[in-house]
Amino acid sequence: MVGVIIAGHGNFASGIESVIKLIVGEQENIRIVDFLEQHSTEDLKRNILENINELNCNSYLIFTDIPGGSPFKASVEVSMDNENIEVISGTNVPMIMEILFDRDNEEVEKLKQRAIETGKKQILSFELKESKKEKEIKIEDGI
């Protein structure tokens, strides 16, 4: 199984975990690492490593918040010593949800690519547009 680590500034990781639990319930082999104000970057790296060791999976996917931020950098450093660790930044909930139920049957590299594609597809905006028919009605009514 691919283990999942979620790391981020403040309570980013805890927040993502709470959303996952609310939507799909408790998941196995997931750990969170919050990078709080009182933590040093060495604390952060040590916490990531400790969580990886506790999971004891064959491979790991680490989701981080900000590209280039401390959680991302610490995760990359950890991954450089282990070829079975992949790191993603810019995490959103749908990208984690996409891979949760296929972690037994899929290679970490393929899961990483699926997560990234899902994350990109889930970035949307809402725009309210008038339909052509509504515009015609307003013109007929003299509005």
Image (spheres, rainbow, N blue to C red):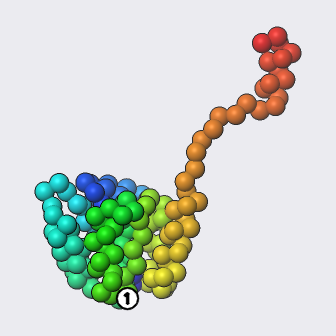
Against 56, residue 126 (above or below) is: above
Disc 1 residue crowd, few under 14, some 14–19, many 20+, Cα 10 Å: few
In the image, is residue 49 above or below residue 43?
below
Most extreme residue toward the left is 38
Q: Nearer the viewer, residue 29 or 70?
A: 70
Occupied quadrant, residue 14: bottom left
* 39, above or below 46, in the image: above
User: In the picture, residue 39 is in which quadrant?
Assistant: bottom left
Q: Position of residue 137 (x, y in %)?
A: 82, 20
- The x, y position of residue 37, in whole percent, is 17, 54
Task: Identify the image quadrant of residue 136.
Answer: top right
Name the residue furthest top.
142
Quadrant of the image containing the C terminus: top right
Establish if 104 lies above or below 41.
below
Q: Is residue 68 left or right of residue 31?
A: right
Q: Which residue is drawn at the image coordinates 70% and 34% (left, top)?
A: 129
In front of the other: 138 or 73: 73
Which secondary structure, mark 1? Answer: loop
Q: Which residue is at 40% across, 79% downward?
A: 86
The residue that label 1 is drawn on is 83
